[in-house]
Amino acid sequence: MRITEGRPYPLGATADATGANFAVFSAQATRVDVCIFDEPNGREIDRFELPEYTDEVFHGHIDGIGPGTFYGFRVHGPYEPEVGRRFNPNKLLLDPYARAHAGKLAWDPAVFGYTIGADGDDLTFDERDSAPYVPKSVVVDPNFDWHGEYRRRNVPWDQTIVYEMHVKGFTKLHPLVDERVQGFYAGLGSKPVVDYIKSLGVTTVELLPVHTFVDDSHLLDKGLRNYWGYNSIGFFAPDPRYAADVPNSLREFKEMIARLHDGGFEVILDVVYNHTAEGNERGPTLSFKGIDNVSYYRLLPDQPRYYINDTGTGNTLNLSHPRVIQLVCDSLRYWVSETRVDGFRFDLGTILAREPEGFKTESGFLKAVGQDPLLSEVKLIAEPWDCGPGGYQVGGFPPGWAEWNDSFRDTVRDFWRGEAPAKALAPRLCASPDKFNFRGRKPWASVNFITAHDGFTLRDLVSYNDKHNEENGENNRDGHSDNRSWNCGAEGPTEDAGVRALRLRQMRNMMATLMLSQGTPMVCAGDEFGRTQNGNNNAYCQDNAISWVDWDLDDDQKGLVTFFRRLTALFHLYPVLRRSRFFTGEVNPDIKVRDVTWIDANGSEMKPETWDNGLTRCFGMLLDGRAQVSGIRKPGVDVTVLAVFNAHHDVVKFTLPRSPESSGWNRLMDTNDPDLPGQVFRFGTVYEVTGRSMLLFERAAPRKRKARPRRP
């Protein structure tokens, strides 16, 4: 093997007909070596110094190596932690642009750039070789036969239903999946799984992190693992732990994407570009820290030995640096172009828009993404908060972005447990215009959810007043205590028939509220049949039956799935439930129609004093299908619907209101008895709405008048 100058771009390792080109950015290093290994945990068999340095990129081309080669970097430079420089060539480093990783991290003291326990702490310099204990980067073959001309699966935002899931947890216990691929990419792409997801009526699969990540040492010490994966170390490589065929993990991932696309789904990746697994100044040196710590991380300006910790994980990626923006954008483009994913959900998304002075809607990263012709074609969803100053930014992202709306989550939970009035719920049912109706943004920008991976499952939300995280090994101190949950009268499992019936009704209430609200609904996998985590609201470290989806369903759970399928069918059938314009509640002067009318229990339009009454727990929302649909000033032709919400503990007699061009309402759904058949009720009928239940009606078709017989 011989080395030549090569090229400074693309970054990372790029295989060609004669070998591979290597390019790595570092603004402050003095030398970069490429080390070649015979096995992921094997010995170093060759080493090459990258000969050229162009525009802060070390680069070179090594002949005679190709896909399947295991490698790592050793980066030379000053070790001056007091000013942020932490170069240590004794530490083998992962390529930030590696398309695949092999091997596992062993938490040996040698993986740290300093000597643990020595006087001087992280200011000391450790001379032990970390290569035996760290994973290796892998040169990959990018070719994959996608079987035919590619067409992106673009689901319009106003038709999107997001289904959040974990690659392993969803199929690990699935009885119809081949045991050899349970819990792997191949299992998620298998026909029984794709068929089941398709039967639910959802459109978009959102996967918890699949970028390569690290199991935290403190978890391994307790016999636990990082299950969720929010601890990334490689932004271009699918984690091999989810591959049944580890040497071909990238190929298996692409095959899974292809099979999900065949099923008609979009695929969105939950991505973690806010921090890495290298922690703070006492963390390991695995990649970025040893390549260019000052460039990759935000450091305290007056004490660059220490890291800014806006993420709560020890470090924060420096998205103000152009090369870090490039890294993230290159990663996003890679997943879109090479693996054909359809969008991203950004964990702690506020971090991405931070500049030294704080959150900015015109940050360098947001501007870079906003003008990118490839990324503009995919869905972008922000988790619009972080742990830093001014970190809560719901509604603060620019046009083109959707955002998780925790105001929807909290208000819906509070309403159905009797802690929030109708006035608080109303704007959440209408896509939270107080937060999102600006700069031409649409209702779909509000990603509505009741539950997510983080927190109680839907069943646990109605079964526990308090978290039960003892299995996490932190004496139940971890996880949020403010869950806005209500156990319906008993903590945890119970044989009380009344409590069980109420819990089922409350689950139906919240699922129905989610699916019948304006905005983009997101469902957590397993909630459609009421899976439980036994009260654990922070199962990030539970790679076991606590987190894995249990497919052994009882009759009640099967009934919930049937109900959920009815809800998604209603969502797709009635366009008025997913309008692309925010409701105003005002009469449109051009077509003389009000888009939404709020109805009190007497069948009359809600008055200010009724809205302001904090005890108002029962009300109706009438969505007029004749309301203007787009910017064109003409009436709509959709069906008019009436939703009735009753969070009162007892029956409320609700008078069904009048609506033009009809004489009655056809019942579509009653969460008290989901098996009730459709039935038409005349205007003015007093409907006894069961305590803590929800109804949906459609305006009945107008009766045709009988023609008078002509006189002879």
Image: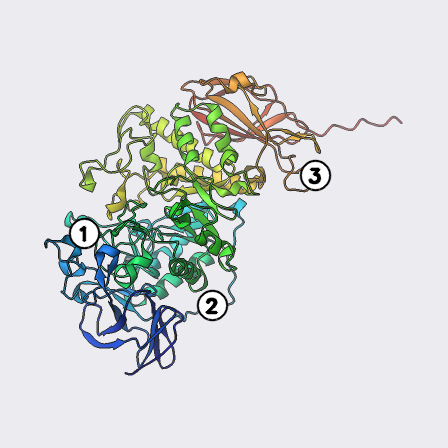
Q: Are marks 2 and 1 in contact (CB under 8 Å)?
A: no
Q: Quadrant of residue 486?
A: top left
**Residue type at tag 1:** Ser
Mark 2 neighbour density, 10 Å: few (under 14) some (14–19) many (20 or more): few
Q: Is residue 323 above or below residue 523?
A: below
Most extreme residue toward the front is: 302
The answer for how far apart the CA atoms under marks 3 and 1 are is 62 Å
Per the rendering, the mark at residue 147 is: 2
Name the element at disc 1: helix
Name the element at disc 2: loop
**Residue type at tag 2:** His
Per the rendering, the mark at residue 217 is: 1
Between discs 3 and 1, the one toward the N terminus:
1
- The residue under the point 49% across, 36% down is 435
- The residue under the point 18% across, 52% down is 217
Per the rendering, the mark at residue 634 is: 3
Numbered disc in front, either 2 or 3: 3
Most extreme residue toward the right is: 712
Quadrant in which the C terminus appears: top right
Q: Position of residue 302 (x, y in %)?
A: 28, 49
Q: Quadrant of residue 697?
A: top right
Between discs 2 and 1, the one toward the N terminus:
2
Between discs 2 and 3, the one toward the N terminus:
2
